[in-house]
Structure formats: C-alpha cells, structure tokens
C-alpha cells in the first residue's frame, strides 16, 4: 500500500503546491515535499512495533499496526511536525501555519486512502471511539506480487495514476510547464527517450527528414545524446 499512497498523495501534493504558489509566498517545493512525506507517518506504527518487538522480544506488542491511524496522532504530528518543519526552513520559506497544514493534509490523505482501499480499515476517531471506518470503495486485492512480496492492487494503481495525471494536467493548464522543472521529472523521463529516438533516426536515415521538418536543428547538434 505504501507505493499506492505515494501516487495518491503525489496527486494531492501537486494541487496543494499549486495553490500555495499562487496565493501565498511559501516555497512550493517544500510545500509539496512536506505533504508528500507526511503521508508516510501513519505507517511508522509498523516500524515502531517491529522495533519494540526486537528490543523486548518477550513482551506483548504494545503497538499494533494501525495505532497511528487516528485523529489523536494526526493532531500531535500536525503540531510537532509543523513546528519542526518551520524551524528547519524558517519563515521566508514556509510559515508555521503552512507547515502544519501540509503535515495535516499529507497525514490525512493516508487515512482517507486506507479507508478507500481496505474493507476493514482503522479506528480513525480513536481514542474517542473504537469504531473501525472503511468504505470498501476500492477493495485491495493485492494482485501484484513481485518475488513473493505483495506490492499492491492493479485497480488501485490505475485510479491513482489517473488522479495523478489529472492533477498534473490541471497544474500545467494553470501554471504552464515550468513547475515541472523543480522536480526534474520531465528531463529524467524525456532525455533517455529523446536520445533513443535520435539514435534510431540516425541509424535509419530519418534524421534528415527530422532536420528538414525542423524537429532537430542540425545533424551536428542532434548527434549529442
Ligand atoms: Zn496505513
């Protein structure tokens, strides 16, 4: 589920960073990064549980996976995490309110995603009520298994990729392509493809057609990958 969280919350981070960039002076790269990284926090209950079990092997596990999936931990992490992020970057980059809001949104997105995907999710309103919340909307099937390790459900990935694509398209529509350069995503994806196409064009002689059509500038320049 962690990879799926990564995709869904990336979609949220793209939109949140766009809004912050448009309407505030906060650094959109930090905003997006904080929203995205806060998404990991709820599942650290698993790491804490395993560490405690390792340290005290004969004690009953005090923490279960799911124990950080509630509004109590959400509130705590929003306050403490927001303050730590603010202290790290300072007011010029991100305000205390923005830092806390980004932590809150990233963390909350994880809970919402879990509720969407698990038939039995977690008691999100603990400690007030132990009622387990879920929607069963996109029930996880864990049909993708690589070397015996389940890495998620194909339909959950498909919906996530659609949401992320939609978020990117909305932001490109509003802001143009420049913001993508912050993340170096496009060059990393496009450059290998571009050099491959140019290589094939060279080998097949198509490069001359490209040059005539103005797609590549000249043979010398397009030689460089
Ligand atoms: Zn979770």
Image (cartoon, rainbow, N blue to C red):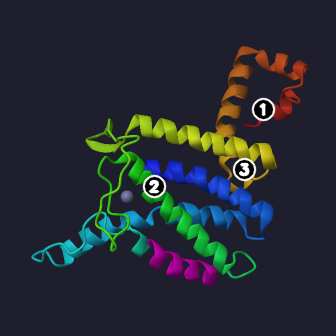
Label 3 element class: helix
Label 1 element class: helix
Magenta-drawn segment: 74-88
Label 1 or label 3, whichever comes before in sequence order: 3
Disc count in the image? 3
Does 78 lie within the magenta span?
yes
Image quarter for ligand 1 equals bottom left
Judged by depth in the image, the label closer to the viewer, 1 or 3, is 3
- Disc number placed over residue 223 in the picture, else none: 1
Give the CA separation, mark 3 to mark 2.
26 Å
Residue annotated with mark 3: 180
Residue annotated with mark 2: 112
Give the CA separation, mark 2 to mark 1.
49 Å
Label 2 or label 1, whichever comes before in sequence order: 2
Name the residue rendered at 30%, 43% in the picture: 150
Predominant secondary structure, magenta span: helix
Residue 221, percent from left and from top: 84, 35
Between 213 and 140, the one nearer to me in the picture: 140
């Amino acid at each position: 589920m962690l990879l799926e969280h990564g995709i869904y919350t990336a979609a949220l981070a793209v939109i949140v960073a766009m809004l912050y960039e448009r309407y505030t002076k906060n650094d959109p790269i930090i905003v997006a990064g904080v929203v995205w990284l806060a998404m990991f926090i709820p599942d650290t209950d698993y790491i804490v549980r395993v560490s405690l079990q390792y340290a005290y092997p004969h004690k009953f596990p005090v923490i279960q996976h799911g124990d950080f999936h509630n509004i109590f931990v959400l509130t705590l992490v929003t306050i403490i995490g927001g303050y730590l992020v603010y202290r790290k970057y300072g007011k010029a980059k991100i305000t205390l309110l923005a830092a806390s809001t980004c932590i809150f949104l990233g963390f909350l997105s994880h809970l919402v995603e879990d509720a969407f995907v698990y038939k039995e999710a977690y008691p999100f309103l603990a400690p007030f009520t132990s009622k387990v919340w879920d929607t069963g909307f996109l029930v996880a099937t864990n049909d993708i298994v690589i070397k015996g390790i389940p890495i998620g459900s194909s339909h959950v990935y498909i919906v996530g990729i659609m949401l992320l694509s939609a978020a990117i398209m909305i932001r490109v529509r509003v802001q143009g392509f420049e913001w993508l350069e912050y993340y170096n995503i496009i060059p990393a994806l496009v450059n290998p493809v571009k050099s491959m196409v140019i290589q094939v064009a060279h080998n097949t002689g198509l490069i001359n057609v490209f040059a005539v059509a103005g797609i590549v500038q000249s043979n010398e320049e397009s030689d460089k990958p």
